[in-house]
Image (spheres, grey):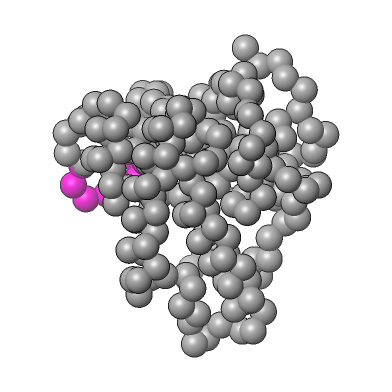
């Protein structure tokens, strides 16, 4: 049942200020489980293919389990940091402004890797997928889960909580599944570390102009 007081944010402001929160996650303030449950109730209203509702939600609050996930996450981040895909490797076409933004993102991502095990709540969005992922286009599978995960983040933001979207833990998906007892036919889609946030509020992010990415009728 949804009944908690939410922040006074208009729909567009809520959507534009739901950011990935890393350095501003409050690692010491307990998160009431009712806020997590209410946010998940909102998430369950998201679209899902054929109304299958094959999603599952691992909510991890046990300190030892969070520390275990944090250990795997740190290893995954270290591998990512040493890969060509690392966001900290600025592209040659980046402007000084864009490089500064990427530097901030990199710094906050590194911080999250260090403290992941201490974030009060880990929410892992999962979906029943069978023993093997489908070959070819998987848009239908993940399209039945990831909108709900985003809805959780928006609902959590409306309740004064911050979260971050990350999939780096999937490098150790089997190990984390074993740690948490997740069945072999259930696959993890995204990890959402969740906590109260520090500071006042968030601003819309700097994005590329719309006309660079919108295509009308033809590319």
- State the image coordinates of residue 177 (x, y, percent, origin top left): 28, 34
Residue farthest to the top, as pictured:
1
Residue farthest to the bottom, as pictured:
92
Closest to the observer: 31 or 215? 31
Position of residue 161 in the picture relative to residue 74 (left or right): right
Placement of 125 over or under 51, stated as above or below: below
Position of residue 197 in the picture relative to residue 109 (left or right): right
Magenta range: 134-143
Closest to the observer: 179 or 8? 179
The residue that appears at 79% across and 39% down in the rendered structure is 10
Closest to the observer: 46 or 177? 177
Question: Magenta region, mostly helix, strand or loop?
Answer: loop
Whether residue 140 appears in magenta in the rendering, the answer is yes
Position of residue 202 in the picture relative to residue 179 (left or right): right
- State the image coordinates of residue 35 (x, y, percent, origin top left): 64, 24
Which quadrant: the N terminus?
A: top right
Q: How many marks?
A: 0
Q: Is residue 180 visible?
A: yes
The residue that appears at 39% across and 54% down in the rendered structure is 74
Placement of 149 over or under 112, stated as above or below: above
The residue that appears at 66% across and 42% down in the rendered structure is 26
Q: Quadrant of residue 196?
A: top right
- State the image coordinates of residue 209 (x, y, percent, origin top left): 66, 70
Q: Quadrant of residue 155?
A: top right
Q: Is residue 19 visible?
A: no
Position of residue 188 in the picture relative to residue 148 (left or right): left
- State the image coordinates of residue 68 (x, y, percent, origin top left): 36, 39
Whether residue 175 appears in magenta in the rendering, the answer is no
């Amino acid at each position: 049942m949804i009944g908690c007081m939410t922040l006074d944010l208009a729909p567009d402001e809520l959507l534009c200020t739901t950011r990935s929160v890393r350095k501003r996650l409050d690692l010491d303030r307990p998160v009431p489980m009712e806020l997590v449950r209410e946010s998940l109730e909102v998430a369950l209203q998201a679209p899902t293919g054929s109304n299958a509702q094959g999603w599952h939600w691992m909510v991890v609050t046990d300190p030892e389990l969070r520390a275990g996930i944090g250990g795997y996450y740190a290893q995954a981040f270290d591998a990512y940091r040493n890969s060509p895909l690392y966001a900290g490797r600025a592209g040659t076409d980046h402007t000084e402004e864009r490089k500064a933004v990427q530097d901030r993102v990199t710094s906050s991502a590194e911080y999250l890797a260090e403290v992941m095990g201490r974030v009060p709540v880990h929410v892992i969005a999962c979906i029943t997928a069978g023993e093997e992922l489908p070959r070819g286009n998987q848009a239908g599978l993940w399209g039945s889960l990831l909108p709900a995960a985003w809805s959780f983040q928006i609902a959590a933001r409306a309740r004064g909580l911050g979260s971050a979207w990350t999939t780096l833990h999937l490098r150790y998906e089997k190990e984390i599944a074993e740690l948490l007892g997740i069945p072999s036919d259930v696959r993890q889609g995204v990890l959402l570390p969740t906590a109260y946030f520090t500071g006042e509020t968030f601003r819309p992010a700097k994005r590329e102009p719309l006309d660079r990415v919108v295509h009308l009728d033809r590319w």
